[in-house]
Image (spheres, helix red, strand yellow):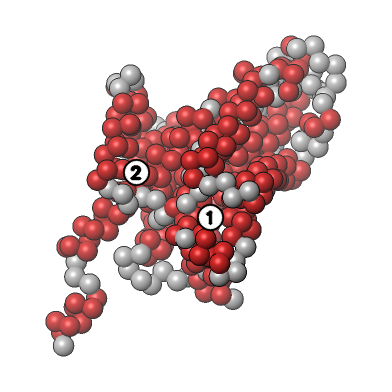
Amino acid sequence: MKLFSSIFNFKRSGEPGAVIVPFVALLFVVTLFAALGNLVFPEGSVLHVSTYSITLLGKYLCYAMLALAVDVVWGYCGILSLGHAAFFALGGYGMGMYLMRQIGDRGVYGNALLPDFMVFLNWESLPWYWFGFDHFGFAMLMALLVPALLAFVFGWLAFRSRVTGVYLSIMTQALTYALMLAFFRNEMGFGGNNGLTDFKDILGFSLQSDTTRVVLLAITSLLLSLLLILSHAIMKSRFGKVIVAVRDSESRARFLGYRTERYKVWLFVYSAVIAAIAGVLYVPQIGIINPGEFTPINSIEIVIWVAIGGRGTLVGAVLGALLVNYAKTRLTAIFPEAWLFALGALFVVVTLFLPKGLFGLAGSIRKKLLPSPAAVKEVKS
């Protein structure tokens, strides 16, 4: 009951939760406009939205979900994870394995049992860990369960040993780097350097269809909204208050009797599941998953999105991911070699002058322009 009431606790203006409902409403409007623009209005109309734009928007929303995952652990618990790309990629590989099994005998080699890359590498039978991935429910369960289990084991070992700060960040980055090296090997049975691609259908619907693309975008938008609201509810609950106490002074929280490592482990697992969901939705929209998604630089970029948007604000992290990736799309087409320098400079400026990110800057401007309710009440009296 407390969790249910906290879900709708958006009344205090000026707090991050106060903008979640308007943001979700705006997200639905944009998604609806994009869907109608693609399916209803013909090409040549000023209201037409191309399939390329639909795919690009879906990718941005997946990245926004990934930024939300990092903000939950970093912004509210102080766990600077540089390994969330690993959970994202594992979720993506789960979906990719399901999509590969749906190809059947329509591959280049026409083998109904083995994916093309296995035929090319002279594999004679399907590895045991591919069994069951021709069923959507099982594949989705594995796509979420494997990252969650990895996060639980890693978090349990690290937090019980009281590994914190930069040491924890290095360990998370080593984790994703090790997975990247493993998935690059052809012997792993995941396509090696090329990864998994050439997908055809999902649940019997063609991935080349505009309708399928729009439905995937709508599902991504809906899940991002639900996860945003759920994360806000968790942070407003008693569990979330303990998490913030652990971030501010873990030794004091432990002295008061809280088993802080348990709170951190469960939050880390929750965050990993969000990242895995983002990976699951990313693959059918982009059409490929390969070991490049594990690269440490991807995890670092996620942290930059959150820092620019506003750490510990949820909506700020989502907006940061959307803004940075939109700028990346535009600037890499114009100045491909200057993008990383621009991103680095923006990160330095935000870190030095905007510790609360662009979301914090918008809040400060709002406070200066609009009087507080208490001040208005005092003037009226």
Bin the neighbour count of mark 1 within 10 Å (Cα to Cα): few under 14, some 14-19, many 20 and up.
some
Front-lying residue, 262 or 120:
262
Q: Where is residue 228 shown, x and y percent of the image?
A: 49, 56
Quadrant including the N terminus = bottom right
C-alpha separation, residue under disc 1 versus residue under disc 2: 21 Å
Q: What residue type is labelled 1?
A: Leu
**Quadrant in which the C terminus is drawn:** bottom left
Q: Position of residue 224 (x, y in %)?
A: 51, 51
Residue at left offset 50%, top offset 71%: 6
The answer, for residue 301, to whether it is visible in the render is yes
The residue under label 2 is which amino acid type?
Ile
Query: Which quadrant of the figure has residue 370?
Result: bottom left
Extreme residue in the left direction: 379
Q: Which residue is found at the position 27% from the left and 58% from the top?
A: 363
Disc 2 target residue: 308
Secondary structure of the residue carrying tag 2 is helix
Occupied quadrant, residue 364: bottom left
